[in-house]
Image (cartoon, helix red, strand yellow):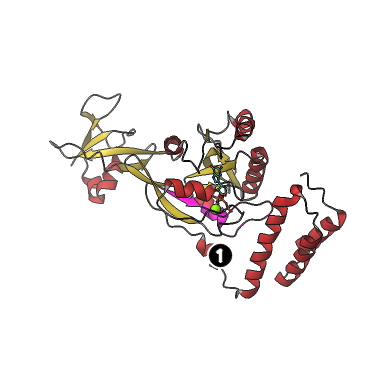
Amino acid sequence: MPANLTPQYLEAETKFKQAKTTPEKIKALEVMMAIIPKHKGTEKLRAQLKSRMAKLKEDLHKRPTLGKAEQAFNIKKEGAAQAVLLGLPNVGKSSLFSQVTHAFSEVADYPFTTQKPIPGMMAFENLQIQLVDTPPIQLDHIEPGLPNLIRNADALLFVLDLTDDPLFQMEVLSEELNRMRIKPVGNGPVPSFDAGWAVLRTLLLGNKCDVKNAINGYRAIEAQFRNTFPLLPISAKEGMNVEALKKEIYPLLDILRVYTKTPGREPDFTDPVILKKGSTVEEVALSVHKDFVAKLRYAKIWGSGKFNGQMAKRDYQVSEGDVIELHI
Ligand SMILES: Nc1nc2c(ncn2[C@@H]2O[C@H](COP(=O)(O)OP(=O)(O)OP(=O)(O)O)[C@@H](O)[C@H]2O)c(=O)[nH]1
Ligand SMILES: [Mg+2]
């Protein structure tokens, strides 16, 4: 980091790390804030210190109601699947969230605007996907509750500010996720990991591409991650590539849509049955009614690569867009 921190600062930082109680931490942090060199290179760090101080002071006044912080991170899943927005401070997470959902999340030109996760629904074709806006990721600080929120998600959206060293942002994101034992992966087969690790499909969003120098940031990210992650340039502010973004999210979710019909009737294409990829006719029946599963004799299927009305047994794997008539 081009911060040129002084030995005195580093010493204060060590004290801070060793501090056990909140008042001790506040004292050490006060020293750090007082002696940190004040120039452009430490701008981010100073913002982080400030936010940390605000949190510590809040802790001081708050009675230790255990799990309260975690509670705010306990977001009930709704819709077909859930994708969580992640990124450093001020990269445009809330701007994007507000652009694609009907929910509200405060946007401001200073960092650490978002303090707790906020859910909202994003319409895509005939389904609703839940997006979760989050407080920013920062180096060496994990919000309690955030690891669980991420682990429970169906996919991650990394929001990168293309105008502010996006490669550094990627480094911080992967380092912090690594500490949470979370592995972001792109499309394609999911690699196997040791027990305890969560593997999550991730889309990289290069934001602020309306700004003139953003192209350089985009090229840097593209050069390094083109083969690892799906990547899309966007402008949350101007709504650029928002539709493309929805299309990119869907395949990350590892879900498929099928439509059920009764004999002699047309299926309702506005009301998909949403299932995990690899699901079978049996699971389609289960989603209609649990009694159906026991009584199910066979299904008739319409879809690509099949005969119209092809007969299928209960263990037949359904595909995206199939129309299914269940016979009991
Ligand atoms: N030019 C431009 N500015 C943007 C864009 N997206 C966000 N911004 C600006 O970037 C600043 C931060 O936006 P937010 O949406 O609050 O960023 P955030 O990532 O939610 O920030 P925190 O909640 O503090 O982590 C605001 O001044 C936005 O107007 C974009 O696509 N283009
Ligand atoms: Mg925000």
Q: From the viewer's side, name the closer residue of 204 and 214.
A: 214
Task: Place residue 48 in its image quadrant.
Answer: bottom right
Left or right of 117, for residue 172? right
Q: Report the number of numbered marks.
A: 1
Residue that badge 1 annotates: 69
Which residue is depicted at the point 71% across and 59% down?
49
Quadrant (top left/top right/bottom left/bottom right) for the N terminus: top right
| Residue type, mark 1 in image | Ala
Quadrant (top left/top right/bottom left/bottom right) for the C terminus: top left
- Tell me the crowding category of disc 1: few under 14, some 14 to 19, or many 20 or more residues within 10 angstroms, Cα based: some
Regarding residue 20, the answer to whether it shows in the image is no
Q: Where's residue 291, x and y in %?
A: 23, 50
- Which range of residues does the magenta coloring cover? 130-149
Which residue is depicted at the point 66% across and 70% down?
57
Magenta stretch holds residue 148: yes
SS for tag 1? helix
Which residue is depicted at the point 34% across and 43% down?
127
Q: Residue furthest right?
A: 7
Q: Where's residue 8, x and y in %?
A: 86, 58
Q: Which residue lies furthest to the left in this view?
A: 264
Regarding residue 48, the answer to whether it shows in the image is yes
**Vertical arrangement, residue 318 with respect to residue 118, above or below:** above
Q: Where's residue 42, x and y in %?
A: 75, 50
**Vertical arrangement, residue 211 with respect to residue 51, above or below:** above
Q: From the viewer's side, name the closer residue of 108 and 260.
A: 108
**Vertical arrangement, residue 49 with respect to residue 94, above or below:** below
Q: Where's residue 71, x and y in %?
A: 51, 64
Magenta stretch holds residue 216: no
Give the prevailing secondary structure in the magenta stretch: loop
